[in-house]
Image (spheres, helix red, strand yellow):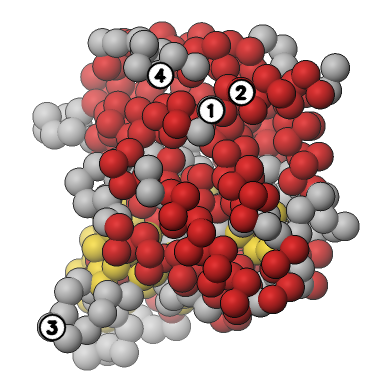
Amino acid sequence: MAAIIPKCISEVTSSWLSSILGTQIIAFNTSTVAGGHLADVFRIYDILYADSPSLLPPSLIIKIACQKEDHRTIAASNNAYLREVLFFEKLAVKVPLRTPIIYSVLYDNLERCEFFSIIMEDLSSHSTVFDQLTDQPKEADIRKIILELAEFHALFWESDTLNLDWVGFPENRYKFPMHEAALECEDNIDTFAALWENAFKQRPFQPKWPSLEPMTRLICDGNAERLLCQIYKILSQRPHTLLHTDLRGNNLFRTKPQIGEPSEITYIDWQLVSRGPPGLEFSQAWQHSIPPVVRRKDLDFLKQYHQRLTEINPKATAYTYQMLLEDYRLGFVLWWMTLITLGTDVLKILETPEGRETPEGRETPEGKEAKGWGTTMPYMYQAIEDHDCYGMVKRLLSFSN
């Protein structure tokens, strides 16, 4: 008999958890973990095992499909759930990055995964997240991550793994994992701008980012699909490797400082794992997770990465530094288009009292995350400005005429 996949946290009972973990559980508590857009994440803690002491930990994390149907639709259309469950089932052990210990993976089908559950290690017991608001990666952290990603990308450089159906398209064809959301920016830009102004009492387009509004209006004036086709044409001609694709600060944990011990990085949330050129990895990693004063060292970071990548795998020399830099800039455009759509949904949370506060008057996790966009998105706006993404978009659209 197939195991039941919980569709909400109330369906995670002591009997269900006991059957999944193979040991009797008497009781536990749960709390919501903030930060997910496409899935719901909960901490299971104060676990009381019948056999005490247990070899299993006192707390765990469970990740399940999002309660919001429209979010599940986005996830299913982009194979987000399927990517993550199959990554942990088939690829995680091969990846030279630390990933969470996995205790259980369940999913409904291999064609269009809509419901799933992953029970994994509770990293908070020994690590802290790189919070995008309060504890952003420092330069030393970024340089450590760069070297680890070079090893990861070098291992899967042009490998057979990239031809797996759920990783991406064969024959080097590229398609952004969040394609549908990027395409829908045309339908959402006006709502996004209005919600932003309501939430933060200022327009998203300001004089300090003079190219942001004309670039956005150009894209959203019926040109999104044409622009994506041009970007995909370029990215499909590049060498490919395996990408995490969503390395923002909230998807990275570091071990708590120990005297004489270096910090270890754990990489979570593999819902967008896909094939592609590695420049795309860094645009999402740095665009709104680190402040501009650090991010403006990005050219130096990219040179360090490229040098290490080609040292580990000489075949990667075909991917020049200039290609890396161009793909990095293209990634800013892809993610800006995507975040217009995702942000429209996120910022709606702040429109209602129940979205902002719990019945007890405390800030909701979702409301806290939505308010955080007011801090982190301007980092992205500045990156778009610094790298003249508007000029690049104009050139790409002129080539497609």
Does label 2 or label 4 sit earlier along the sequence? Answer: 4
| Residue 182 visible somewhere in the drawing | yes
Q: Where is residue 41 drawn, in percent x and y? A: 39, 53
Crowd around label 3: few <14 · some 14–19 · many ≥20 (10 Å) = few
- Which quadrant is the C terminus positioned in? top right
Q: In terms of secondary structure, where does tag 2 sit? A: helix
Amino acid type, residue under disc 2 in the picture: Gly
Q: Are marks 4 and 1 in contact (CB under 8 Å)?
A: no
Disc 3 or disc 4, which is closer to the eye?
4
The vertical placement of 201 against 69, above or below, is above
Image coords of residue 240 (percent x, y):
73, 60
Assess whether mark 4 and mark 2 are in contact (beta carbons under 8 angstroms).
Answer: no
Q: Which mark is residue 388?
A: 1
142 over 288 or under it: above or below: below
Residue drawn at x 79%, y 72% as measured from the top left: 160
Tell me the mark number nearer the camera, choosing from 4 and 1.
1
Q: Which residue is mark 2?
A: 391
- As measured in the structure, the alpha-carbon distance from the residue carrying label 4 to the one carrying label 1 is 11 Å
Q: Residue at x 32, y 83 (%)?
A: 56
First-in-chain label (4 vs 1) = 4
**Which of the labelled discs sits on residue 209, or is there none?**
4
The part of the image, by quadrant, that contains residue 378 is top left
Q: Nearer the viewer, mark 3 or mark 2?
A: 2
Q: Which mark is residue 259?
A: 3
